[in-house]
Image: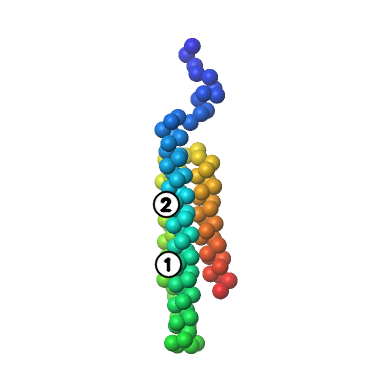
Amino acid sequence: LGAAPASRNSLPSLPQRVAEAVVLAAGAHYGALLAELVDTVRKTETSMKRLQQRQAPGDAAGGASDGDKIFAQLQLDVASFGEQASAIAPHSKGLTRVLEGLHACLREQSESQAAQ
């Protein structure tokens, strides 16, 4: 009488399921926005490089580009989102997949940048 069946304890509660659904929906939306932003920054940087080459051929600019700075900030933002989302839905396998997708989007960008 005192103990609930083990299978019942392993099911997430309604608030946990709602929290996970909200975090997954936010993560999916964040992923779409991130992919769009990465694409826009890539295109803008490519255009800026072409423009700079036309205006001053052979003049190499040193230091980190604006795109590099944006992607560094996005890395921090994704890490922060992951920490906060994990605090809300700590045992979510779906969240793990969402975070892997976010990191993959940024990883593809850094690999693409390194190839140029």
User: What residue is at 54 percent from the left and 47 percent from the top?
Assistant: 97
Q: Where is residue 42 in the image (x, y as percent from the top left)?
A: 48, 69
Q: Where is residue 73 in the image (x, y as percent from the top left)?
A: 42, 61
The quarter of the displayed image where residue 115 is located: bottom right
Residue lying furthest right in this view? 115
Q: Is residue 38 visible?
A: yes
108 w.r.t. 15: above or below:
below
Helix, strand or loop at label 1? It is: helix
Amino acid type, residue under disc 2 in the picture: Ser
User: What residue is at 52 percent from the left and 46 percent from the top?
Assistant: 96
**Would you say 84 lies left or right of 94 here?**
left
The residue lying toward the viewer, choosing from 90 and 26, is 26
Label 1 environment density (alpha carbons within 10 Å; few <14, some 14–19, many ≥20): few
Quadrant location, the C terminus: bottom right
Residue lying furthest top in this view? 1
Label 2 environment density (alpha carbons within 10 Å; few <14, some 14–19, many ≥20): few
89 w.r.t. 46: above or below:
above
User: What residue is at 46 percent from the left and 73 percent from the top?
Assistant: 45
Amino acid type, residue under disc 1 in the picture: Lys
Q: Position of residue 1 (x, y in %)?
A: 49, 11
- Badge 1 is on which residue? 69
The answer for how far apart the CA atoms under marks 1 and 2 are is 17 Å
Q: Can residue 64 be seen in this view?
A: no
Q: Position of residue 62 (x, y in %)?
A: 45, 78
**Would you say 98 lies left or right of 81 here?**
right
Mark 2 or mark 1, which is nearer the start of the sequence?
1
User: What residue is at 47 percent from the left and 50 percent from the top?
Assistant: 28
- Badge 2 is on which residue? 80
74 w.r.t. 64: above or below:
above
